[in-house]
């Protein structure tokens, strides 16, 4: 069995609906990924252990999704030198601004690549992870290139009747 190069970590099972965007994208690209629920606040030791072992386990990029006081991506980044991509989950109370600021406002020295709030962010996290892998993988690069051409084609095909 191959070791997945992309890890998707969610702070709660309630984040899964949003992260389906990332999962579907990775499935479309036939990329191997692993999925875990680990919480920076509820299971901090497991987050640290997972992060520390990731590189040795063959992971190349970690996507971390959390909402509210979203410490997950930052805590993972504190324990590894792998690139960490944060997905701020939309929240009811503050519409995800809380998640966004918690994810993006990292102190100097511990970078997290924060995506947009919610579903677009989840999708882009998957694409960004693939783009990182594509720096050394021609096959993924070809698929990304085809994906972008298809996006452009759809826009060019739009006909407005007004
Ligand atoms: C965060 O708290 C999770 O990532 C989730 O977005 C949010 C709420 O979690 P639940 O109370 O739904 O488990 O840690």
Image (cartoon, helix red, strand yellow):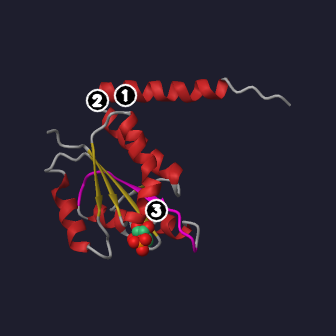
Q: Residues within 10 Å of mark 1 (few under 14, many from 20)?
A: some
Between residue 35 and residue 94, name the one nearer to us.
35
In this view, 22 is above or below 37: above
In this view, 42 is above or below 26: below
Between residue 67 and residue 16, name the one nearer to us.
16
Q: Is residue 92 magenta?
A: yes
Q: Residues within 10 Å of mark 3 (few under 14, many from 20)?
A: many
The numbered disc on residue 137 is 2
Tell me the residue at 32%/58% (across/down).
Answer: 9
**Disc 2 residue: CB within 8 Å of ligand 1:** no
Decide which of tag 2 and tag 3 comes sooner along the chain. 3
Q: Which residue is mark 1?
A: 141
127 on left or right of 5: right
State how far apart marks 3 and 1 are (Cα): 27 Å
Please state the extent of the stretch shown in magenta in the rendering: 80-93
Q: Position of residue 8 (x, y in %)?
A: 32, 53
Q: Quadrant of the N terminus?
A: top left
Q: Which residue is mark 3?
A: 104
Q: Are marks 2 and 1 in contact (CB under 8 Å)?
A: yes
54 on left or right of 106: left
Q: Position of residue 154 (x, y in %)?
A: 61, 27
Q: Position of residue 108 (x, y in %)?
A: 38, 64
Please tell me in which quadrant of the rendered image residue 152 appears: top right
């Amino acid at each position: 069995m191959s070791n997945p190069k992309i890890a998707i970590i969610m702070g709660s099972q309630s984040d899964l609906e949003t992260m389906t965007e990332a999962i579907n994208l990775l499935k479309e690209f036939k990329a191997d990924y692993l999925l875990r629920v680990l919480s920076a606040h509820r299971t901090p030791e497991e987050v640290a252990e997972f992060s520390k072992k990731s590189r040795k386990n063959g992971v190349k990029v970690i996507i971390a999704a959390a909402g509210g006081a979203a410490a997950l991506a930052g805590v993972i980044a504190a324990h590894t030198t792998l690139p960490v991509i944060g997905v701020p989950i939309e929240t009811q109370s503050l519409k995800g601004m809380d998640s966004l600021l918690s994810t993006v406002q990292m102190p100097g020295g511990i970078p997290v690549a924060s995506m947009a709030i919610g579903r677009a962010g989840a999708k882009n996290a998957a694409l960004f992870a693939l783009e990182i892998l594509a720096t050394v993988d021609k096959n993924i690069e070809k698929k990304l290139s085809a994906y972008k051409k298809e996006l452009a084609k759809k826009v060019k095909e739009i006909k407005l009747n007004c």
